[in-house]
């Protein structure tokens, strides 16, 4: 069966999306490790310098890592995944006489997209990148006759771009085999989940070899995307790019570097010693919200909690008590705090950096509202440093690290990429 979404008429004119970010003028595609054929092709197309996501993603994909890219359309993400994948196909061609060589219609790269419009756009870009390489790209989507698509496939297919519904139809009818897929890309994964494609994605990935490289792109990062990544990916590297949003001018931002196990103790110390008004503490999980509330309350802090496991009446009560000043401290998760309308919060404390820079701006925006001033504190363990640095990069502010005596994190030992490979047993 084909999804209704795929049955709406296809837009024949595809507006090329404008590049919404500045390319990095100090870098070239050659610097990123791409082979000369690909660099020359890219130059012919007119890309002079890579965009931020291309600069970050291309080396990671070439190294064979799974990747989660948090990026919107317009950032150059199609080239960010397709150029290194074409590079990989060219550098490890199918052996002559092998089973794969006899099945030229079995794709080695599969790109799943939520809509046919995006599928067509990705296919067009791939076609253009692959010119002169001998590699073939085919696109399949629902709502149109299968015949032409079957004919295209029979002529050979290295890269298949597909919407999940039509792909499942074709797999079921044994028109397509996914047995040879080495590289899977989920483009606009958040939209695919919103559109209810998860069961289709599961059916598709069940047909594929586990020993593959998986790349996932999404405009947002939430627990659904994290869950999908856990299910489909192997130790993925995450990168985030996008528009810059900043916290308000009146917010003083602070970062405390702290040993993870000492976070509750440091939090308590700060709450007791700081001169503060109503304070909102964010945790990533409900479990952490429960634990933090318990520890603080046990130590005599006037604290309440707000998360989605509580009944509506408990949530309303917690909020009313915080607003009236009965409790001066509230521990909340992101979900529960959405849309909270509380003025006069003097301090926002992130128990750990949030998963996305947008969430950081959103959380920190709870203080210093309406031209007032406020303080935003983030507690950062050593393993959370990369996430915090990405947040700082996105908001365009470097925040000095404060270390409190007795709470210092252990020193981090930097390991080079080649050393890491050696430790993993690679040559
Ligand atoms: P995308 O985010 O992949 O939809 O790309 C957005 C638009 O930017 C497309 O029209 C691309 O052709 C264009 N584009 C992608 N990368 C570059 C680059 N490095 N330099 C100039 N234009 C680019």
Image: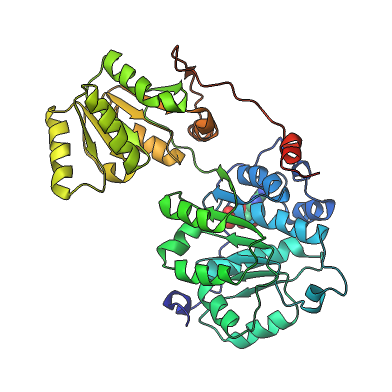
**What is the number of callouts on the image?**
0
Residue 121 location, quadrant: bottom right
Q: Give the residue at x 74% y 71%.
A: 136
196 on left or right of 383: left
Q: Which quadrant is home to the C terminus?
A: top right
Q: Is the residue 130 above or below the residue 11 in the image?
A: above
Coloring applied to the structure: rainbow
Q: Residue at x 54, y 81 (%)?
A: 169
Quarter of the image for residue 29 reads top right
Name the residue furthest right: 96
Q: Of 8 and 385, which appears nearest the observer?
A: 385
Q: Viewer-proximal residue, 37 or 20?
A: 37
Q: Nearer the viewer, residue 394 or 273?
A: 273
Q: Is residue 408 above or below residue 78?
A: above
- Residue 20 on image: x %, y %: 55, 47
Percent coordinates x, y for residue 142 in the rendering: 52, 79
Q: Residue at x 48, y 28 (%)?
A: 381
Which residue reaches farthest top?
A: 405
Question: Does residue 64 appear to the left or right of 230 in the view shown?
Answer: right
Can residue 369 be seen in the rendering of this structure?
A: no
Q: Is residue 176 visible?
A: yes
The answer to whether 254 is drawn above or below residue 317 in the figure is above
Q: Residue at x 59, y 86 (%)?
A: 173
Residue 61 point in image, percent of width and height: 68, 50
Residue 34: give x, y in percent of width and height.
Answer: 78, 49
39 on left or right of 231: right
């Amino acid at each position: 069966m084909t999804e209704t979404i795929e049955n709406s008429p296809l837009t024949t004119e595809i507006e090329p999306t404008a590049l919404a970010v500045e390319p990095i003028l100090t870098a070239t595609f050659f610097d990123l490790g791409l082979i000369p054929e690909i660099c020359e092709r890219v130059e012919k197309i007119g890309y002079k310098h890579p965009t931020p996501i291309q600069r970050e993603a291309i080396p990671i994909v070439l190294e064979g890592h799974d990747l989660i890219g948090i990026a919107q359309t317009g950032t150059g993400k199609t080239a960010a995944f397709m150029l290194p994948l074409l590079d990989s196909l060219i550098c490890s061609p199918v052996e002559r006489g092998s089973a794969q060589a006899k099945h030229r219609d079995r794709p080695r790269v599969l790109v799943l997209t939520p809509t046919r419009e995006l599928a067509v756009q990705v296919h067009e870009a791939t076609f253009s990148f692959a010119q002169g390489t001998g590699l073939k790209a085919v696109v399949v989507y629902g709502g149109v006759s299968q015949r032409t698509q079957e004919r295209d496939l029979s002529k050979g297919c290295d890269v298949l771009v597909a919407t999940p519904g039509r792909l499942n139809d074709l797999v079921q009818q044994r028109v397509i085999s996914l047995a040879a897929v080495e590289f899977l890309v989920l483009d606009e994964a958040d939209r695919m989940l919103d559109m209810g494609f998860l069961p289709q994605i599961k059916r598709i990935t069940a047909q594929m070899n586990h020993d593959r490289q998986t790349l996932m792109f999404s405009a947002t990062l939430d627990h659904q995307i994290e869950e999908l990544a856990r299910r489909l990916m192997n130790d993925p590297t995450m990168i985030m790019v996008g528009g810059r949003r900043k916290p308000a001018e009146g917010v003083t931002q602070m970062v405390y570097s702290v040993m993870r196990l000492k976070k509750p103790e440091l939090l308590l110390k700060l709450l007791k010693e700081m001169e503060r008004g109503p304070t909102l503490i964010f945790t990533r999980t409900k479990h952490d919200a429960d634990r933090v509330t318990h520890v603080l309350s046990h130590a005599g802090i006037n604290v309440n909690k707000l998360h989605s496991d509580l009944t509506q009446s408990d949530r309303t009560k917690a909020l009313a008590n915080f607003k009236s000043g009965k409790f001066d401290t509230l521990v909340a998760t992101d979900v529960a705090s959405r849309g909270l309308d509380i003025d006069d919060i003097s301090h926002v404390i992130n128990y750990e950096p949030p998963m996305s820079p947008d969430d950081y701006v959103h959380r920190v925006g709870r203080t210093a509202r309406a031209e007032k001033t406020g303080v935003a504190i983030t507690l950062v363990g050593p393993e959370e440093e990369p996430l915090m640095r990405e947040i700082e990069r996105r908001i365009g502010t470097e925040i000095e690290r404060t270390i409190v005596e007795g709470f210092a994190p252990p020193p981090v030992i930097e390991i080079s990429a080649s050393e890491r490979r050696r430790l993993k047993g690679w040559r």
